[in-house]
Image (tube, rainbow, N blue to C red):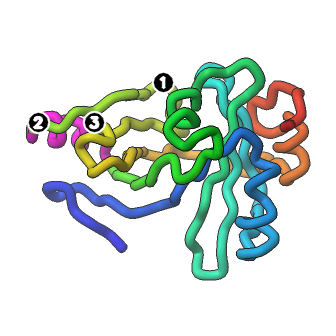
Amino acid sequence: MDLQLDGLEVSFDHTAVAAPRIRDLLPVYHDLLGGRHLGGGGDHRVAGYRTLQLTYANGNKVELMEPLAGSTFFDSFFELTRGRGGVHHLNFHVNDLQAAVARLTGRGYRLHGLNRSDSRWQEVFLHPKEAHGVLIQLAQPGPREPGEPRPALEEVLSGRGRNGNGVPSP
């Protein structure tokens, strides 16, 4: 479904679920609910987390996330969820992140985590206090290289996904 933000194209892309271990999420989201890993995923070393996405028959996606060893990225989130994890954020794609940021700040919304450093993925977050307790990620995906490798599920879990650190998931 396409939504509008003062004329910008906005479309829902995925729900992200975080836990201390992606392997603990797979029995539900992969085995029970039938999510298929179509390749891809990897490590975000600077922030300190690993991700992969599962796709379902209707095209919807769930992103699974876990902290990398030694990372504090999810500490406050896990504190809120008593260490179990849960829904971390909702992701919406926009066709012009710069314009979305300008329109939201112009309306007085609090944004954080603006990251335009990677042309493949630029993002900003709408603070949960602005969205009834839900972290909203707005992202502008960029071009991918033709034939870019898409690591298999076990490659991502073994730390050999995109930007992988070589350390297997716990």
Residue 27 in the image: state x and y as whole percent.
80, 64
- Which residue lies at the image location 49% right of the left edge and 38% below the top edge? 80
Q: Residues within 10 Å of mark 3 (few under 14, many from 20)?
A: some
Residue 29 in the image: state x and y as whole percent.
71, 65
Mark 1 highlights which residue?
117
- Which residue lies at the image location 33% right of the left edge and 47% below the top edge? 133
Q: Nearer the viewer, residue 169 or 143?
A: 169
Q: Nearer the viewer, mark 1 or mark 2?
A: 2
- Residue type at mark 3? Gln
Q: Is residue 81 magenta?
A: no
Q: Is residue 85 left or right of residue 43?
A: left
- Residue type at mark 2? Gly
Alpha carbon of mark 3 to alpha carbon of mark 1: how far?
13 Å
Q: Residues within 10 Å of mark 2 (few under 14, many from 20)?
A: few
Label 3 element class: helix
Using the image, tell me which numbered label, if any, was put on residue 108. Answer: 2
Q: Please give the range of residues in magenta.
A: 96-107
Quarter of the view holding residue 111 = top left
Mark 3 highlights which residue?
98
Label 3 with label 1: CB-CB less than 8 Å: no
Alpha carbon of mark 3 to alpha carbon of mark 2: how far?
16 Å
Residue 164 in the image: state x and y as whole percent.
80, 31
Which label's residue is closer to the chain start, 3 or 2? 3
